[in-house]
């Protein structure tokens, strides 16, 4: 589980229903691409010619993909990335806004979280990660950035209002003082500063970004799915994210302790072998 094809543990294959190989996933727009590879679901923001500016169609398609993966046992971790060499996402697609009309926020500005799923999500960030693109990245649980990544929230210079859910995530990640600096000035910061602030978890050379992200996703996917879901629900409840509750999180935590996977985990620990978790 989580190993490269040809090296997978036969015990894991038999017990956990592991299937090697890449499985393409149909999406409602070519602006989003998706596939599953060795427990990991990959979502690609596919508008490289627009620096992956996010359209309404993209928001809708991401939701459709993640809704399907929420109950797909072959997906244990999700990675979101941007196509091309220039950007993770350069923001919302302002071209969809009629500049002669007031009271019309850009795509996603009135939405809740974009990356809503009960499984760990990693944002694999390179190049521009700006405005609405940063809001999508902050929806992820973990952010790995290339050393060429650039972050900014240009709401002030544009005269826009940054969505409340984005502000909540930003303050949670970097604190009130640093969030104030980013929101009030609209300044751009590089990946190393973003890591120091807590906006990203880790910065790596761009040439190593994909390998580092795959290694992290594989490591997470080796763990028990119920434990991952419980941890994610608990963290969401602690910071009071929309749709979360302490009661639901506690139910998921309790479920772990009576699961088949807990029995398997203990047995594998005692036998000094890799566990084969099945999510039950």
Image: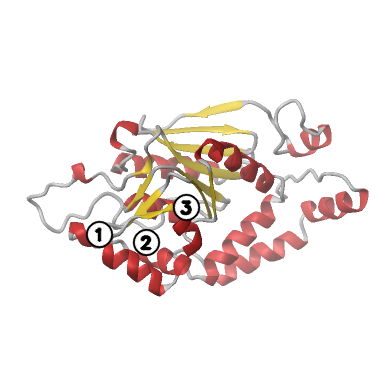
For disc 3, the marked residue is: 116
x, y (%) of residue 51?
32, 38
Residue 152 percent across, percent down from the top left: 33, 55
- Dot in front, 1 or 2: 1
Q: Quadrant of residue 77?
A: top right
Q: Residue at x 69, y 57 (%)?
A: 227
Q: Which residue is mark 2?
A: 166
Along the line of sight, which residue is nearer the eye, 27 or 215? 215
Image spot of residue 13 (x, y percent): 77, 33
Q: CA distance from mark 2 to mark 3?
A: 14 Å
Residue that mark 1 sits on: 155
| Residue at (25% x, 59% y) in the render | 155
Q: Are marks 1 and 2 in contact (CB under 8 Å)?
A: no
Q: Could you tell whether 235 is left or right of 181 in the image?
A: right
* Residue farthest to the bottom, as pictured: 177
Left or right, 16 with respect to 86, comes to right
Q: Quote the CA–CA distance across marks 3 and 1.
A: 24 Å
């Amino acid at each position: 589980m989580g190993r490269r094809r040809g090296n997978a543990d036969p015990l894991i294959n038999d017990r956990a229903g592991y299937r090697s190989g890449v499985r393409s996933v149909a999406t409602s727009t070519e602006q989003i691409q998706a596939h599953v590879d060795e427990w990991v679901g990959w979502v690609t923001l596919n508008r490289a010619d627009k620096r992956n500016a996010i359209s309404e169609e993209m928001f809708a398609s991401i939701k459709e993909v993640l809704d399907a993966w929420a109950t797909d046992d072959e997906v244990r971790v999700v990675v979101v990335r941007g196509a091309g060499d220039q950007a993770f996402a350069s923001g919302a697609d302002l071209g969809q806004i009629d500049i002669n009309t007031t009271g019309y926020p850009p795509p996603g500005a009135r939405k809740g979280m974009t990356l809503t799923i009960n499984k760990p999500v990693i944002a694999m960030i390179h190049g521009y990660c700006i405005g609405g693109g940063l809001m999508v990245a902050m929806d992820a649980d973990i952010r790995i950035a290339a050393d060429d990544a650039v972050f900014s929230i240009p709401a002030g210079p544009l005269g826009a209002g940054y969505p409340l859910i984005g502000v909540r995530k930003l303050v949670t990640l970097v604190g009130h003082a640093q969030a104030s600096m980013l929101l009030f000035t609209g300044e751009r910061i590089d990946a190393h500063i973003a890591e120091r602030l807590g906006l990203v978890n880790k910065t790596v050379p761009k040439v190593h970004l994909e390998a580092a992200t795959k290694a992290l996703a594989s490591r997470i996917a080796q763990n028990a799915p119920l434990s991952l879901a419980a941890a994610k629900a608990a963290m969401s409840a602690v910071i009071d994210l929309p749709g979360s509750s302490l009661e639901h999180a506690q139910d998921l935590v309790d479920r772990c302790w009576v699961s088949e996977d807990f029995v398997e985990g203990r047995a594998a620990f005692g036998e000094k072998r890799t566990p084969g978790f099945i999510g039950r």
